[in-house]
Amino acid sequence: MEVLVFFIGASIGSFLNVLIDRLPKNESINGRSHCDFCGKKLTPFDLIPIFSFIFLGGKCRFCHKKLSWQYPGIEILTGLIFLVIFNLQFPVSSEFSIYNFQFLKLVSFWGIASSLIVIFFSDLKYQLISDWILLSLFMFSLPAVVLTKAGLINSIVSGLIVSLPIFLIYYISHERAMGLGDVYLAGIIGFLLGWKAGYLALYSAFITGAIFGLGLMIFKKKGMKTKIAFGPFIVLGTFLMMFWGERIIQIIKKIYGF
C-alpha cells in the first residue's frame, strides 16, 4: 500500500509541476506538456513520474538539453508527503478503508498538501501566489475543518485573527513587505489550524524567514531592500503545525505553565 501511495503522490507531483510554472504566468494548464527549450510536445514515455527523468539521463529526448531537477524533486517530495499523511491517518495498527470519514480526511489533507507545495515553489520561483491555488487550498481545508469538528464559525474567526498581523504589515508597508496573497494565505491557514496553531505557524515563518534573510545578507551580500518571498516560510510553518502542532502546543504549555 505504501508503494501505491507514494506513486499516487509522485503522479500528483508531476501535475503540480505544471501548475507551478503555468499559473503564475496565466498560462492554460490544458494541453500536453512540452520541453521548455525546444518546445516539442512530450510523449507519455517522457512523463512517467521520476522514472522518465532517470531513463532519459535528465535530458530532453529531442534537444538533449539538461532538464531542471525541480521536476523529479517535486514528484519525490509530493510522494513522501502523501506517504507521511497516509501513515498519520492510517497507522499500521488501523485498517484502511475508503468507506469512512478518515479516508475523506486523508484526501482533504492530500489536497491541502498539494496546494501548499504549489504555493511554496511558485512564490519562491516567481514571487506570485495564484488566486486559483488559494481557492483550492481553502476548498480542501473546508472538509478538513468540518471532519475535525472544529466549528465553522470558530474557524472563520481564527482565520481573521491570524491574517490580521499580515494584513497590517501589508497595509502599512503599502505592499512592499507583504503581498495580498500572503494575507489570504495566512487567513486560510488560521481557518485550517485554528488561531493558536496558526499564530505558531506564522511565528515559525517569521523566525525562519529572518534567519534565511540574514544568511543571504552575510554570505551573498544581499541588501536590506532585497525582496524575499514570505509564502514559502508560511508553508513550512503550516506543515510543521499540521504534523507536530499538538505536540508543540503541549510543550509550550509545559514550559510556560498554562
Image (cartoon, grey):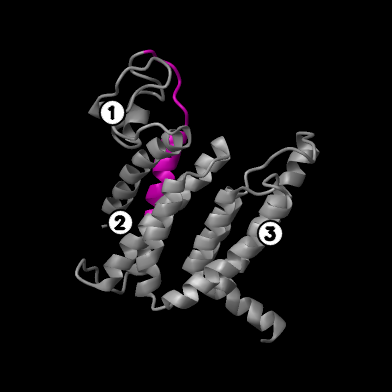
Q: Is residue 249 above or below residue 114?
A: below
Report the front residue among 212 and 49: 212
In the rendered image, which residue does mark 1 sit on? Answer: 32
The secondary structure type at the circle numbered 3 is helix
Report the front residue among 240 and 51: 240
Mark 1 surroundings: few (<14), some (14-19) or many (≥20) residues within 10 A: few
- Residue range in magenta is 63-83
Q: Which mark is first along the chain, 3 or 2?
A: 2
**Is 86 left or right of 97, judged from the image as shown?**
right
Q: Main secondary structure of the magenta part?
A: helix
Q: Which mark is residue 2?
A: 2
Query: Where's residue 229, x and y in %?
Result: 62, 44
Q: Which mark is first along the chain, 2 or 1?
A: 2
Report the front residue among 37 and 170: 170
Q: Residue at x 59, y 69 (%)?
A: 161
The secondary structure type at the circle numbered 1 is loop
Spatial CA distance of label 2 from label 3 is 44 Å
Spatial CA distance of label 1 from label 2 is 29 Å
In the rendered image, which residue does mark 3 sit on? Answer: 168
Query: Where's residue 137, x and y in %?
Result: 42, 56
